[in-house]
Amino acid sequence: QLGLVESGGGLVQPGGSLRLSCSSSRLTFDWYPLGWFRQAPGKEREGVACITTNYSTFYADSVKGRFIISKDNRKNTMYLQMNNLKPEDTANYHCAPLTRCVGVPSPADRRYDYWGQGTQVTVST
């Protein structure tokens, strides 16, 4: 168990915003690249964004310009600011430490074979 905790999800109307948070009681986030992933019902889990240890970022085309990934090492917390949300953003969102962040993250880039519970984001009227 990595003690990963995702939070901040909820129900929001199209065009709205949410900020997701990811923290861990057992990992020091400053040591790893980090990523956000999501899985919609009936679909494969996909990478959303990742951030390197020196704050470089990469985004999936579907969220580029709308989502912002960031981290606060003092709080050992990573964030995903999601703006202009669309119904197709509806999914369960997960965070994970990575072995690398050189483009849109893949689940295969995870450092550990572990998923937290995630946080549900639902975009609907």
Image (tube, rainbow, N blue to C red):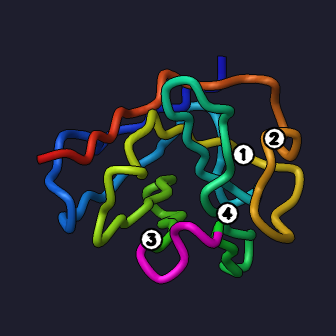
Q: Earlier in the sequence, mark 1 or mark 4?
A: 4
Q: Quick one: 88 or 24, which is closer to the camera?
A: 88
Seen from the viewer's position, the closer of residues 114 and 121 is: 121
Nearer the observer, disc 1 or disc 4? 4
- Asked whether disc 2 touches disc 1, contact meaning CB atoms under 8 Å apart, the reply is yes
Q: Is residue 3 above or below residue 70?
A: above
Task: Residue under label 3, please give it.
Answer: 67
Alpha-carbon span between mark 2 and mark 1: 6 Å
Q: Amino acid at mark 2?
A: Arg
Q: Is 11 included in the stretch rendered in magenta? A: no
Q: CA distance from mark 4 to mark 2?
A: 11 Å
Question: Which mark, residue 97?
Answer: 1
Mark 3 touches mark 1? (CB < 8 Å): no
- What number is the disc on residue 50? 4
Q: Which residue is mark 2?
A: 110
Q: Nearer the viewer, mark 2 or mark 3?
A: 3
